[in-house]
Structure formats: C-alpha cells, structure tokens
Amino acid sequence: MGKAAYQDGISAPRHLSVTSKPSRPVTLPSARQVSTALSRNKDAQSPDTTFMLVQFAQFIAHDISNSTSSSLMALITAALNKYYSGALLAALVEKVPDPNNSSNSVTVQCCLPNANTSPNCPLHPSCFPISIPANDRVFGRLNITCMEFTRSKPAPVTGCALSMFILTYASGN
C-alpha cells in the first residue's frame, strides 16, 4: 500500500492522478467505472469459494453499517442482493442541522437534479458524489447518472463513547 495522497494534501479525495502536471491534468476515473471494470458479473463456478463467502461478506457489511455514514452499507447490500433499482440508491447518509430550522436535521443530498458532480462543485463538505457513465450496464438503462456518497466522519463526535459494534465478525472471534 502506498502513501496517502489527498487532493489538498490533507483530506480531500483526489480527482486528479498523482502523475498530473498543471499543464497536462490527468483525471481519475469515477469509482463506479473502476468497480464495473474490476467486477464483470460473470457466473463462474469456483472450487475455492462457497456460500460462506457471501455470509462473511454480509457480516462485514453489517460492521460497516455501524459507521457514522451508512451510505456504503446500502451499496454493499445492493451488490450482495443484486437488487439494482433506483430505490436502493436512496442510501442512508449523514444527517446535518436543517439551515431553516436548527431543531431539525436533514439528509445531505449530493446528487441534485441537473447538478454538476465535479469535485469542484460547491456541495456539502461530506459530499463526494460518484458519477455514473451513461453506458453503465446497470444504472444506464435507469438514467441514473449520480450515486449518493458521503464520507464517513474521520473521528467520533466529541464526548461520544467508542463502541465495538460487531467487530467480532470481522476478526473471526
């Protein structure tokens, strides 16, 4: 594993390759493009894997769902169950104070209608929407061009007690 390389040198996800030059920027592919390139959805029999792999993946997914942002859990569940529909993209994302009523909270929306999903788009600081190409084999036919994604919090809220969640599944205990 290489050293961390953030766009701003601190925490912003990269949208340019580390080989980019100011005169010749090299844009990184979207996470969705990488995901579909690596998993071709082939029904291949494997003598090395069993249904236990799916069960273990579900345990890991449950553990991930206990992070502050659960949008990743919704996407993992969609992949495991192979129920691809627009409803599954309504992922559980971070709640923030409502700017109109401070006693309420609202869900951060990163994929707004007709919005530019560029990393330079002025969105909520937790937003990092994933652009989906028009020719995507799953979402293309549904005309979905953006996948909601909010980054999980890098540290617990001040005063929040740390919990073990269900890490025993991940560690095999």
Image: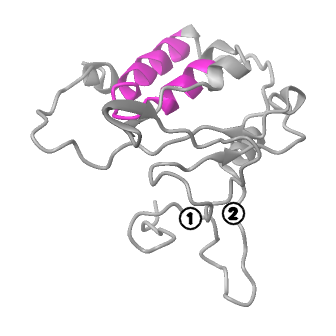
User: Do we see residue 48 in this rendering?
Assistant: no
Question: What predominant SS class does the magenta segment belong to?
Answer: helix
Q: CA distance from mark 1 to mark 2?
A: 8 Å
Give left or right: position of 154 versus 122.
left
Give left or right: position of 167 versus 14.
left
The boundaries of the magenta stretch are: 52-78
Image coordinates of residue 44 in percent, x first then y, are 78, 20
The image shows residue 53, relative to residue 14, as above or below, that is above
Give left or right: position of 70 versus 41.
left
Mark 2 lies on a secondary structure that is loop
- Whether residue 4 appears in magenta in the rendering, the answer is no
Report crowding for label 1: few under 14, some 14 to 19, many 20 or more residues within 10 A (C-alpha): some
Residue 106 lies in quadrant: top left
Asked whether the beta carbons under mark 1 and mark 2 sit within 8 Å of each other, the answer is yes
Q: Residue at x 47, y 16 (%)?
A: 58
Residue tagged 1: 14
Q: Which mark is residue 28?
A: 2
Mark 1 lies on a secondary structure that is loop
Q: Residue at x 51, y 70 (%)?
A: 7
Image coordinates of residue 128 in percent, x first then y, are 56, 50
- Tell me which colouring the rendered structure shows: one colour
